[in-house]
């Protein structure tokens, strides 16, 4: 399945998220949303990326934009990661790769010389109507959250 800028995002069923919440394609409608996909809770790059989005959360919120982190980790892992990093937004657990596949972020990657299938760090900006307005793939963490925020500001 492919996802394209200026097209509606794929419908997806409710998925468990932190704070005993659920997120679906329907719950994203009516508000700007950032979905950032990352490989694994509590790893260096993922921690830095989450800290960056946390630091800028108030600016995103002031523009009417909610943020969700997404990985294949369990709710328990997400709750621990969120608490340890004091994240002001929810993390979506996608162990069955429903959202990962809908947004085409599952890729073959090299890890310690072996080919492994994993999440390619990617971010998606979705408008109030459920339309994808911007995407970032193969994300490099430094400066990324700021770049997403600048893109969001340019839409306002």
Image (cartoon, rainbow, N blue to C red):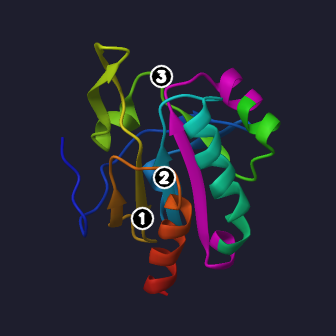
Q: Does the magenta stretch include residue 136?
A: no
Give the residue displayed 43% in from the left and 50% down from the top: 140
**CA–CA distance between discs 1 and 3?**
22 Å
The x, y position of residue 48, in whole percent, is: 63, 45
- Specify the label residue 126 is tagged with: 1
**Residue bearing the label numbered 3:** 95
The x, y position of residue 38, in whole percent, is: 49, 38
Question: Which of pointers 1 and 2 lies earlier in the amino acid sequence?
Answer: 2
The x, y position of residue 77, in whole percent, is: 67, 23
Left or right, residue 155 beside residue 74:
left
Determine contact: label 1, label 2, CB under 8 Å: yes
31 or 135: nearer the viewer: 135
Crowd tier of the residue under label 1, counting other residues whose Cα lies within 10 Å: few below 14, some 14–19, many 20 or above = many
**Residue 30 showing in the rendered view:** no
Question: Which of pointers 1 and 3 lies earlier in the amino acid sequence?
Answer: 3
112 or 24: nearer the viewer: 112
Determine contact: label 1, label 3, CB under 8 Å: no
Part of the protein shown in magenta: 60-80
**CA–CA distance between discs 1 and 2?**
8 Å
């Amino acid at each position: 399945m492919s996802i394209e800028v200026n097209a509606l995002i794929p419908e997806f069923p409710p998925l468990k998220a932190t704070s005993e919440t659920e997120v679906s394609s329907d719950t994203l409608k009516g508000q700007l949303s950032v979905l950032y996909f990352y490989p694994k809770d509590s790893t260096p790059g993922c921690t830095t990326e989450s800290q960056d989005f946390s630091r800028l959360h108030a600016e995103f919120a002031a523009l009417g934009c909610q943020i969700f982190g997404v990985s294949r980790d369990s709710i328990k892992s997400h709750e621990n990661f969120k608490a340890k990093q004091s994240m002001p937004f929810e993390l979506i657990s996608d162990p069955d790769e429903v959202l990962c596949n809908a947004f085409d972020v599952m890729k073959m990657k090299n890890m310690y010389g072996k080919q492994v299938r994993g999440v390619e760090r990617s971010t998606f900006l979705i408008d109030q109507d459920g339309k994808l307005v911007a995407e970032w793939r193969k994300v490099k963490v430094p400066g990324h959250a700021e770049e997403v925020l600048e893109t969001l500001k340019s839409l306002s």
